[in-house]
Image (spheres, rainbow, N blue to C red):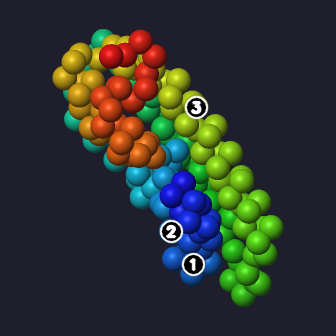
Amino acid sequence: MMGMMGGNMPMMGMMRQSGGGMGGMSGMGGMGGMGGIEAIDHIEGRIAFLHAELKITDAQATAWNAFADALRANAKALSQLRATMMPQAGSTPPSLIDRLTRQEKWLAARLEGTRAIRSALVNLVGTFSDEQHKAADELLAPHMGMMPMMSARGDRMGMPGEK
């Protein structure tokens, strides 16, 4: 958002950073926010890390699996979309309209993924202990494309009913 306010469209900056490709796409928050392109490409490692750090219990397995599946589905969708958006070698640079169309597709996919992840996360967070809530706030908010001030408010990632 900050880049857009300054007149710099994030997609254009990403294209410039990556020589016309989508490799710099982490600037858009990547995986529905989960840490950029690196998280898309290494989602299983990220899921394993979160499982361990959040100390997921057997009783939380069903809610955890739904959350992990939402992360996987989002990563897969964004990875596939990214592949279709890669310019072909030797092709002419995309026009402004083409770049905006690509940005719109990327943002729409991000929104859809974010909604699915949020839905699964609401269920999972409902099973968390206070310690797990604290860990989730620290581990998940920055990787979900949330600005630091949003997670610093202490609102438990904006989950309904959470204080």
Q: Which residue is mark 2?
A: 24
Camera-side residue of 124 and 4 = 4
Relative image position of residue 136 (x, y in whole percent): 30, 31
Q: Is residue 44 visible?
A: no
Where residue 9 appears, as percent x and y from the top left, is: 62, 65
Report the Cα–Cα distance between label 1 and label 3: 29 Å
Q: Closer to the N terminus: mark 2 or mark 3?
A: 2
Q: Splitting the image into 4 quarters, where does residue 86 fall?
A: bottom right
Name the residue carrying label 1: 16
Amino acid type at image mark 2? Gly
Give the mark toward the camera: 2 or 1: 1
Q: Is residue 12 above or below residue 5?
A: below
Above or below, 100 against 145 in this view is below
Q: Report the residue at 65% width, 53% height from top.
A: 106
Q: Secondary structure at mark 2?
A: loop
The residue where tag 3 is placed is 115
**Labels 1 and 3: the sequence-earlier one:** 1
**Residue displayed at 55% across by 70% down:** 14
Question: Mark 2 to mark 1: distance in Å?
Answer: 8 Å
Q: Amino acid at mark 3?
A: Arg
